[in-house]
Image (cartoon, rainbow, N blue to C red):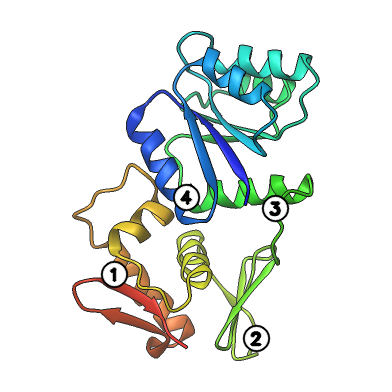
Amino acid sequence: MSRILIAEDESRIALFLEKGLRAEGFTTTTATDGNDALAYARSGEFDLMILDIGLPGQDGFRVLRSLRTAGSTMPVVILTARGGIDDTVAGLDYGADDYVGKPFRLAELLARIRRRLRATGGSGTEPMVLTHAGLSLDLRTRRLTVDERPPVDLTAREFSLAETLLRHPGQVLSREQLLSRVWGYDYDPGSNVVDTYVRYLRKKVGAERIETVRGMGYRLRD
């Protein structure tokens, strides 16, 4: 089980990350300022850090620079609202392994985390093709095969939705869970976008494969 350090001072985002990562089987610890983040990161107890740039105490750039100067090779994924190219370049120059801008989708962040853990030989190793009951989703080509027929092209949202369902086959996922994983923390809970995209995906995989569980959500059937 991989241990993830979350360095994020905005409580709403930190809570969203904690819940989302734990639901995927990760162990999490949260630091809300740069000084604590650096102390945790130096402990050697974590497999990866999600690092916000705008931390109080000392910002994420200073944390990252101090960490790399000390010789740490722990993967660091920067998560920030600063989308300028200068900030991106600075983060990578200081030693970040990846860069995700806010607002973000949990599914995308999870994919980046798993990729970094695979690269370091961490416990995030996983197959690159998800399969279940005649469905096969290639995470590299982002193509879906249904009953060994020619691959189906998916939009970005359809891919994220299919990946989420295939990672939890047989499990009922609420609309709120699907919204948070596919559309991110800044979603509108009153939106019907989940139902719309489930309808799109059903047309490509077969309506009978995605079951509506009344009052609860959706489930990928056997």
**Front-lying residue, 203 or 66:** 66
Structural distance between the alpha carbons of marks 2 and 4: 35 Å
The residue to which callout 4 is attached is 22
Structural distance between the alpha carbons of marks 1 and 4: 25 Å
Crowd band around label 3 with a 10 angstrom C-alpha radius: few (<14), some (14–19), many (20+): some
Q: Which badge, 1 or 2, comes first in the chain's sequence? A: 2
Residue 24 picture location, percent across and down: 51, 56
* Horizontal side of residue 26 vs 190, given as left or right: right
Say which element carries label 1.
helix
The residue to which callout 3 is attached is 123
> At x 66% / y 25%, what residue is drawn?
43
- Which three-letter amino acid code belongs to the residue tagged 2? Pro
**Front-lying residue, 94 or 67:** 67
Say if 160 sits above or below 44 in the image. Answer: below
Residue 14 picture location, percent across and down: 40, 34
The residue to which callout 1 is attached is 195
- Which three-letter amino acid code belongs to the residue tagged 1? Asp
